[in-house]
Image: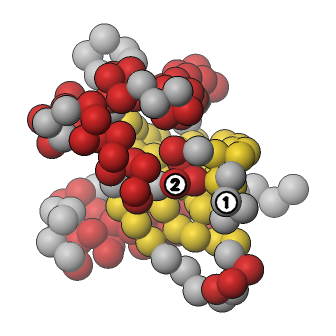
């Protein structure tokens, strides 16, 4: 199997450049990017957070789902119910995944990016890019998710990107 890291790094750099162009990412952040593959320990901690949040989504536990997100998420969404509504409406594959697999993890200091391949119960597949943030207690929490549709028979060849 081909190493996914070089393609992932190009994708992450492209996302950073798009964020810079849109004014969402400071130029210094793009220029300072020096990602590397994450250690097995970091990868395992990131996987635990993402799996924990997905499990919370599957039982509609908004408070638990929010506990796997950075503290700013609780400020952005006034209630766990509002957070769950946003996920249900905009991230159906992640809210109710039929299957998912971890593709690659890269780390740059206190930030890591984890790519998942997620197929929803609706049969649509997305790549989900999770931005993870290292906390003072050593845990990794979810700072945001962007999805890119990769397998939609009705719209073959089209790509759609959403950001959480």
Residue found 14% across the figure and 36% down from its top: 78
Viewer can see residue 31 = no
Q: Quadrant of residue 100?
A: top right
The x, y position of residue 157, in whole percent, is 66, 88
89 is higher (above) or lower (below) than 16: above
The residue lying at 40 percent from left, 57 percent from top is 89
Position of 70 compared to 129: left or right? left
Check if mark 1's residue and mark 2's residue have beta carbons within 8 Å.
yes
Q: Residue 82: x percent and y percent?
A: 25, 41
* Front-lying residue, 36 or 98: 98
| Tag 1 secondary structure | loop
Q: Residue at x 68, y 75 (%)?
A: 152
The answer, for residue 147, to whether it is visible in the render is yes
Q: Is residue 87 left or right of residue 121?
A: left
Give the residue pinned by disc 1: 122
- Count of all numbered marks drawn on residues in the image: 2
Q: Residue 75, how many percent across, how many down?
A: 12, 35
User: Where residue 129 sits in the image (x, y, percent)?
Assistant: 49, 53
Q: Which residue is mark 2?
A: 92
Vertical comparison of 92 with 64: above or below = below
Mark 2 is surrounded, within 10 Å at the Cα level, by few (under 14), some (14 to 19) or many (20 or more) other residues, namely some
Task: Return the residue nearer the eye: 59 or 148.
Answer: 59
Determine the residue positioned at 21% across, 63% down. Answer: 25
């Amino acid at each position: 199997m081909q190493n996914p890291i070089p393609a992932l790094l190009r994708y992450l750099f492209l996302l950073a450049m798009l964020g810079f162009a849109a004014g969402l990412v400071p130029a210094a952040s793009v220029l300072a990017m020096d990602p590397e593959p994450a250690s097995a320990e970091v990868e395992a901690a990131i996987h635990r957070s993402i799996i924990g949040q997905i499990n919370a989504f599957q039982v509609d536990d908004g408070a638990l789902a929010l506990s796997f997100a950075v503290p700013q998420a609780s400020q952005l969404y006034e209630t766990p119910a509002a957070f769950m509504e946003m996920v249900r409406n905009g991230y159906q594959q992640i809210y109710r995944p039929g299957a998912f697999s971890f593709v690659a993890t890269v780390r740059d200091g206190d930030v890591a990016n984890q790519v998942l391949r997620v197929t929803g119960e609706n049969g649509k597949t997305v790549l989900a890019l999770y931005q993870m943030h290292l906390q003072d207690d050593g845990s990794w929490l979810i700072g945001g998710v962007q999805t890119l549709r990769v397998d939609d028979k009705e719209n073959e060849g089209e790509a759609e990107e959403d950001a959480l």
